[in-house]
Image: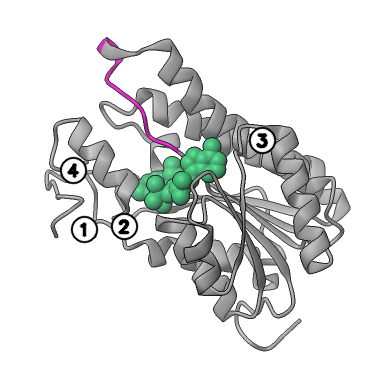
Amino acid sequence: MSTRMFDLTGKSTVVTGGASGIGEAVVRRFLAAGAKVLVLDITDSGAEVESWGAAFRKTDVSDLSDLESALDHAIGLHGGLDVMVNNAGIALHRPLSEVEPERNTQMFRVNAQGVIYGMAAAAARMGAGGAIVNTASASGISGVAGLVEYGATKGAVVAATLNAAMELGPRGIRVNSVCPGLVRTPLAIRSASRLGKSGHMIAALERPAQPEEIAAVIHFLASDDASYVTGQSIAVDGGWTSGTTTKTVDAANP
Ligand SMILES: NC(=O)c1ccc[n+]([C@@H]2O[C@H](COP(=O)([O-])OP(=O)(O)OC[C@H]3O[C@@H](n4cnc5c(N)ncnc54)[C@H](O)[C@@H]3O)[C@@H](O)[C@H]2O)c1
């Protein structure tokens, strides 16, 4: 094992949803740690991502065959697949009184099926020492009014992580998740304004996270420093799931 902390030198890594927010912060950390990075994202931000030093391929994570060919592309580019970060997600939720099937299905397709497809496609292409990290949410392990649909997709990620860890452990592949609380990204800002609130309730630290604070834990879980950690969903939520507070915060304005 390398003596450099969280070293990813020469590792072939793939980050879904890597063009923005938490994914972007992961990509920048991975590059700084020496990894080769392929970003898979549904946006057309290839030129920007490539300017950071990563490769880019437009991919829809809710389409298994699209993901499979994207991972074959990663192997062609970087000579293998060591780390898969299933981070892409959308937040289209409404309160229960406004649930609408098409939007609900789309959110499950991207947030839950997209992660399962990402794990399946990656596991078929990884060897011993491989690491998969999924982005779940604090709303997948703790309740928040208004987040029923979104939280359910993220609870599915937590359950999928547990079960995949059991299936892939004997092959030497680790599977973990992070459960972020409120993180200052475009997704959170859109979601808060749609719910008509200035922000969600958060706990202990009384502030939203910066994307880099989530990326740091994803980086740890992806690295060999976490070689005995698998099946875990780690809350990176400033204490949101540790207790309660009456403080509300604005996702856009600290
Ligand atoms: N921001 C928060 O407060 C928060 C909290 C908990 C969990 N999360 C989760 O973190 C992850 C990253 O979100 P973020 O806050 O950085 O949001 P973001 O909107 O900044 O980034 C999400 C990225 O995913 C991409 N994407 C969306 N649908 C896709 C698809 N079908 N295929 C490929 N790419 C797709 C988007 O284009 C975007 O680049 C998501 O899974 C989100 O649910 C965010």
Q: Residues within 10 Å of mark 2 (few under 14, many from 20)?
A: some
Residue 104 sits in quarter: top left
**Label 4 C-beta lies within 8 Å of the nearest ligand 1 atom:** no
Q: Are marks 3 and 4 in contact (CB under 8 Å)?
A: no
Q: Residue at x 40, y 67 (%)?
A: 212
Query: Helix, strand, or loop for circle 1?
Result: loop
Question: Which residue, given by chain and number where applicable, does mark 3 sit on?
Answer: 116
CA–CA distance in space, label 3 to label 2: 27 Å
Question: Which residue, given by chain and number where applicable, does mark 2 sit on?
Answer: 238
Give the left or right position of residue 124, taking residue 22 as reference: right
Give above or below for 234 relative to 191: below
Residue 93, position as x, y percentages in the image = 34, 26
Foreground: disc 1 or disc 3: 3
The part of the chain drawn in magenta is 90-97
Q: Are marks 3 and 2 in contact (CB under 8 Å)?
A: no
Amino acid type, label 4: Gly
First in residue order: circle 1 vs circle 4: 4
Give above or below for 209 relative to 30: above
Give the left or right position of residue 26, taking residue 204 as reference: right
Q: Are marks 1 and 3 in contact (CB under 8 Å)?
A: no
Query: Is 232 included in the stretch rendered in magenta?
Result: no
Question: Which residue, given by chain and number where applicable, does mark 1 sit on?
Answer: 207
